[in-house]
Amino acid sequence: MKLIAFIITLIVSANSCNKDDNSISNQEQKVKVAYINGAIFTVNPEQVWAEAIIVEGNKIIYVGNTDKALAQIGEDTEVIDLKGATVIPGIHDVHMHPLEASSENFKFILKEDNDPENYVPTIRKALRDFPNEEWLLGWGVDLYALLETKRSPIDILDDISSTRPIAIMERTSHSIWVNSKALEIAGIDSNSKDPSGGIYMKDENGNLNGILIDNAGNLILDLALAPTSQTKANDYNGLVNFALPELAKNGITSICDARTYWKRDHHIIWKRVEKEGKLTARVNLGLWAYPMQDDESQISLLKSLYENDDNRLLKINQIKLYSDGIVHNTTAAMQEEYLIDLFQKPNNNGLNYFTQNRITSYIQQLENVGFDFHIHAIGNRGIQESLNAIETASTGSGRHRITHVEIVTPSDLSRFSQLNVTADCQVAGDFTQPDHWSENAELIGKENSQNLVPIKSLKEANARITLSSDWDVSSINPFVGMQNAVTRFPQNITIEEAVKAYTLNGAYVMRQETEVGSLEIGKKADFVVLSQNIFSVDPNKIANTKVDMTVFDGEVIFERK
């Protein structure tokens, strides 16, 4: 729908527009905009639907019907006729990785292929195309393709180059494929002890095979992406020129950066963008807690980075840490042993980046500063340990959440509500849909493979649910997530619940529910005009929804042409 804006001039009595009244100067007067004739879903239980809203400056001053809206506007009010279009509050995506999704620090992407030998031409070309890059970084390898290759994966990369370090991130971001030069620079050899939350994979002879699992790979990336003027320029340009416009295009007005690598100066990039007035979203940074960092020094540094000014768009008020890994590579922390043993370790029930005791300690020391915790936990053991840590450590003042929440022990469902822990769920990826659940059975058994990401069960247990993208692991498009949320029987919710999960519930975990998240008088004007009515359209067509207009802080930051 092409929105048509027109100015309605009303004849107003001289008393109501007395030019001698200078209590507010012309410069200080705020522009009023009335949006009329819409189908506005407010997410306010006291007034669920409305036809019109009036915005003055960045605040909503009226929510109601069109006639009453027109009756109280002045001659300088801009009136936008929505012509029946659906409006919802600005989308909150409380788990995404915009810097990682948009930076050009990774130089090539591999197409899906079952034979890593077929990647060689692409990697060789990248090596030639970027001769001045100390590290050659890429993305897109498949872990199981590496595990099943005839030659050792490290030999494939060593044949390409033995003098320049090469590191290629696996599609899930939970492993890295490297050559010998990368290991040499990192000081990793066959005698190196596995790091917390990571595994240095070896062949049958005990030699490193070039596959670094979970946090073992993060250690490499911290070296490769140590901040330089060029890496920071790549991050900045990607954020300003790609990520932020993508947010606006998709109706996303508030986000949480779910892995702010402070060692890579990610927080400094965000602060620069805000200082330059280029920030077009409300942003909470989740400072990454490094598993291998000394706890005392890390906690001290995290405290020093805390910023929570209500008058700023950017806040540094969350901690992101991992309890476990993922099911796909058998590192999600499970109560039971995996049915396949990839690593030949004494325990085959997943790993911990942070143990329950360490999570407890971090919450005890950082919650009182004002930090809320955003804990990655996928397996039933990881989720239970995270809930245990919150129960032990939290005073009740934190707004902590567990993200992914794939395999939940039934007795733990009610604990989310009891402990005021938000279940942050991602259902935009196909792998979370019921048609794909059986793919996990060979790893965790049929029973554990059922009801992955149990949003309906969590809802029935009175848990607060947020839906988020984990972009760029899954699509940034929130309407893909909404469609999947309402169609993924037997673990589905209603479209009204899905919208609330993407708006008001997200605002709660960002501590801004009194400012945004619903369309109410006195709140800030963050809202989205949609191309179709997601509440009446065929649920299987919700993902086709386009954003016609995104309004952020009272300003139109995107309009579809």
Image (spheres, rainbow, N blue to C red):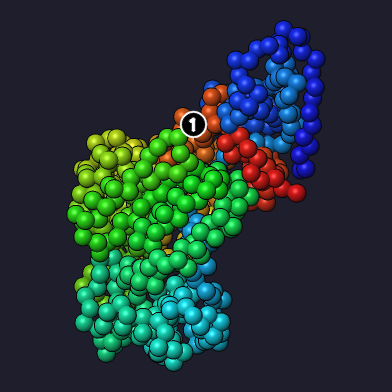
Q: Is residue 349 above or below residue 433?
A: below
Q: Kindly state the secondary structure of the residue where label 1 is placed.
A: loop
Q: Residue furthest top?
A: 15
Q: Quadrant of residue 87?
A: top right
Seen at 60% across and 19% down, the residue is: 24
Foreground pick, 486 / 426: 426
452 on left or right of 517: left
**Circle 1 crowding by C-alpha within 10 Å: few under 14, some 14–19, many from 20:** some
Seen at 42% across and 67% down, the residue is: 228
Residue 90: % across, % down = 57, 39
- Residue 197, can we see it? yes
Seen at 30% across and 56% down, the residue is: 289
Circle 1 residue = 515
Residue 549: % across, % down = 68, 42
Foreground pick, 407 / 324: 324
189 on left or right of 56: left
Foreground pick, 460 / 65: 65
